[in-house]
Amino acid sequence: MNRNWAVILVLTGVGASCGPKAPEAVDPSLAAEIQNIRAIDNHAHPVRPTRAGEQPDRFYDALPVENLEPQSEPVNLQSGSAILQEAGQAVSGARGKPAQVLDLMGVETMLANRVEMGPGMEPPRFRWVPYVDALIFPLDNSKLAARNSDRKAFFALEDVLRKRYLDEAGLAAAPPSLADYLARVVTPTLERHKRGGALAEKFEAAYLRSLAFDPVERAVAERIYSRGGAPGEADYKPLQDFLFRYVAAECGRLGMAVHLHTMAGAGGYFEVAGANPLLLESVLNDPGLRKTKFVMLHGGWPFTREIGALLTKPNAYLDFSQQTLMLPPATVAGSLREWLELVPGQVMFGTDAYPYSKELGWEEAGWIASRWGRQALGIALTGMMRDGEITRARASELARMVLRENAKKLYGF
């Protein structure tokens, strides 16, 4: 630095050690407490370790994002970023050891969003959340797939998963009537998942269509199903809407939650408007679905205020997974504070740990999201304390609620 500028900075107090100290973003004792809470990760895609001679694990997602065309990446996820390098060093000794990765993250239990589980993914450290989108697209999906290259890749994968569910039901093809399809395929699949340990069912529907699942009379759905063929989007939608609500109701009967992607998603063709959580309002208001708990994953970004308003509904929950990978803690803290000021008992921690790339594996992603998620929580709670909204004791209580107690209550741990 130029000597004259150095003198000026000292004389004006800029860069000097004297003068009032700015308050820390996070209360130190609260930060230490948050760091030591063993969390429940509401949403992640851990990769099963493979042994010699095995094919690499492909069941960490029904719709893997590596099938998509290149897209613009958020700054924090770009190759060579400082946080990626730090994360790589932190988890280097735990690769292929999923339970050790959880220990490094400070996670007691991870809800594993996977097609199937397997060795290394056993409870109680890992709990299963399978996929059910394939069940609401029982017809020829070729016209839906023609919308863009992303959906072309995704619907091909959904067709594979639907065939798997048909095979497990002992069927070579979908039954001819909707009644048989519900009785022989949909309900048995959900019941089989429940017996397999599933805590919830996951919809990635926002990658395939909008979240506007309207109420539809069964007779209307039956006519569409019976016609079969390859219906267009408008003609096909009522059947999908009916099936979504049927699946949701069955999940409520079976004691499983329904998880939904609510956030701008991967892929250059992702239709962000269709992921607006407000599109789910009629579902949350449906008297027939009051027994079903809906968990809106990823906190709805960029619709963070809209999703907060939905928390006043008793069957609505959210987590802030993935946001803490894409956005810095101070940004996430703003939304998190608003939610905690509204309905803190329905807000949960999550990471969305996922194998994004060779440099950003699920291990690195989980480590970053856990670290930044805790920082965001600390910033939000510290701000509430300093503004006189909560006491220090209440901050501790809220931290435990977000990081583990809300999930324990929801899933009955």
Image (cartoon, rainbow, N blue to C red):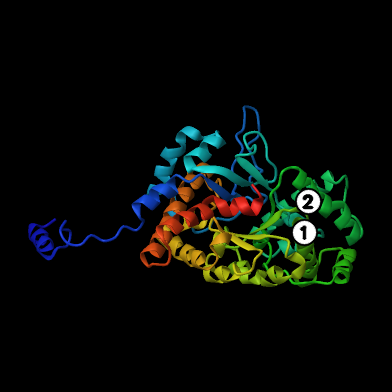
Residue with the mark numbered 2: 190
In terms of secondary structure, where does tag 2 sit? helix
Q: Residue 108: x and y, percent? A: 55, 42
Q: Residue 398: x and y, percent? A: 49, 57
Q: What separation in Å lies between label 1 and label 2 (alpha carbons)?
A: 8 Å
Residue with the mark numbered 1: 247
Q: Which residue is drawn at 31% across and 57% down?
A: 24
Q: Which amino acid does label 2 sit on?
A: Leu
Q: What residue type is labelled 1?
A: Val
- Nearest the viewer among 150 and 248 is 248
Locate residue 210 relative to residue 30 in the image: left or right.
Answer: right
Q: How crowded is mark 2: few (under 14 residues within 10 Å), some or many (20 or more)?
A: many
Locate residue 391 relative to residue 355 in the image: left or right.
Answer: left
* Image quadrant assignment for residue 233: bottom right
The answer to whether the residue labelled 1 contacts the one labelled 2, judged by CB atoms less than 8 Å apart, is yes
> Which is more N-terminal, label 2 or label 1?
2
Q: Residue 348: x and y, percent? A: 55, 56
Q: Can residue 75 be seen in this view?
A: no
Q: Residue 295: x and y, percent? A: 63, 59
Q: Is residue 274 above or below residue 81?
A: below
Q: In this view, does 126 lie above or below 251?
A: above
- Nearest the viewer among 251 and 92 is 251
* Image quadrant assignment for residue 266: bottom right
Q: Residue at x 72, y 43 (%)?
A: 197
